[in-house]
């Protein structure tokens, strides 16, 4: 069988870039996407010559036309999509207060962290259904866990909690299509968003995502995981 095709959003740095690296090492053909074309092309060049191959395409998950252009590219270039990793996210808003928020930040977080993955799934599920096999990984966060949620990072946390809810609904909608849909928390990772003091490496964060990518066909769907272990909703 030809290599499976995987697409990663927000992949020019951090967890997204490392996930691309691990996908290539595992034998996937990878479509690396980034809102910034220059940074995305530079990231793809770093991975050239690795595994089954890397392709770059510009993507702004806030822009439906950008998503449509990417779906057309993937369809014409590969004819299908096997793995979709919704990694792009913004606004870990540690300085915001839920009782007095900047609603501009709230709206941007919801647009990118919730509506972006939702639009991506709607656009790419037709390509994933072709082989009746697929994996969708929504990169979530412990900040979106209702069980342990505090008042901090209100925009980010609420958007990630909604992404978790979307994960459940999507999993039920495609349950008969051979597509597993899960939310994954990579943990507190040393990235531009997580900061230098975070305890986990990008390699560890990406490995948590890869666990959901490589689930067997009878693996879980509609769940929330970190390092292959369930996280309470």
Image (cartoon, rainbow, N blue to C red):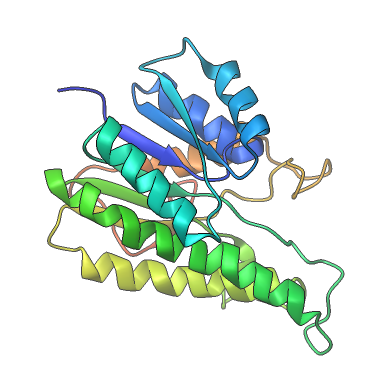
Residue at (44%, 53%) from the top-left corner? 67
Residue at (54%, 18%) from the top-left corner? 47
x and y percent of residue 201 in the render?
67, 35
Q: Residue furthest top?
A: 49
x and y percent of residue 27 in the render?
34, 21
Left or right, 158 with respect to 150, comes to left
Please indicate, yes or no, whether residue 115 appears anywhere in the rendered image. yes
Q: Residue furthest right?
A: 95
Left or right, 19 with respect to 79, comes to right
From the viewer's perspective, is residue 148 above or below residue 117? below
Left or right, 1 with respect to 94, comes to left
x and y percent of residue 3 in the render?
26, 24
Q: Residue furthest bottom?
A: 99
- How many marks overall? 0
**Which residue occupies the foreground of this view, 54 or 207?**
54
x and y percent of residue 60 in the render?
56, 52
Please indicate, yes or no, whether residue 225 appears anywhere in the rendered image. no
From the viewer's perspective, is residue 164 above or below residue 70? below
> Can you tell which quarter of the image residue 23 is in?
top left
Residue at (58%, 32%) from the top-left corner? 17
**Which residue occupies the foreground of this view, 203 or 91?**
91
> Can you tell which quarter of the image residue 29 is in?
top left
Q: Quadrant of the N terminus?
A: top left
From the viewer's perspective, is residue 162 above or below residue 54? below
């Amino acid at each position: 069988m030809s290599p499976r095709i995987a697409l990663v959003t927000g992949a020019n740095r951090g967890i997204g870039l490392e996930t691309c690296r691990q996908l290539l090492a595992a034998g996937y053909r990878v479509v690396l996407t980034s809102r910034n074309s220059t940074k995305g092309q530079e990231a793809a060049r770093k991975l050239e010559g690795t595994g089954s191959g890397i392709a770059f395409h510009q993507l702004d998950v806030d822009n439906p036309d950008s998503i449509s252009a990417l779906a057309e590219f993937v369809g014409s270039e590969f004819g299908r999509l096997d793995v979709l990793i919704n990694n792009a996210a913004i606004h870990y808003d540690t300085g915001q207060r839920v009782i007095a928020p900047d609603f501009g930040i709230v709206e941007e977080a919801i647009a990118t962290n919730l509506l972006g993955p939702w639009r991506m799934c709607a656009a790419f599920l037709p390509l994933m259904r072709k082989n009746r096999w697929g994996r969708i990984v929504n990169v979530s966060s412990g900040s979106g866990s209702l069980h342990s949620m505090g008042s901090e990072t209100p925009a980010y946390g609420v958007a990630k909690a909604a992404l978790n809810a979307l994960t459940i609904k999507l999993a039920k909608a495609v349950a008969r299509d051979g597509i597993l849909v899960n939310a994954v928390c990579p943990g507190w990772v040393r990235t531009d968003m997580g900061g230098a003091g975070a305890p986990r490496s990008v390699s560890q964060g990406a490995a948590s995502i890869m666990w959901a990518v490589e689930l067997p066909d009878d693996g879980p769907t509609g769940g929330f995981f970190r390092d292959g272990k369930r996280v309470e909703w």
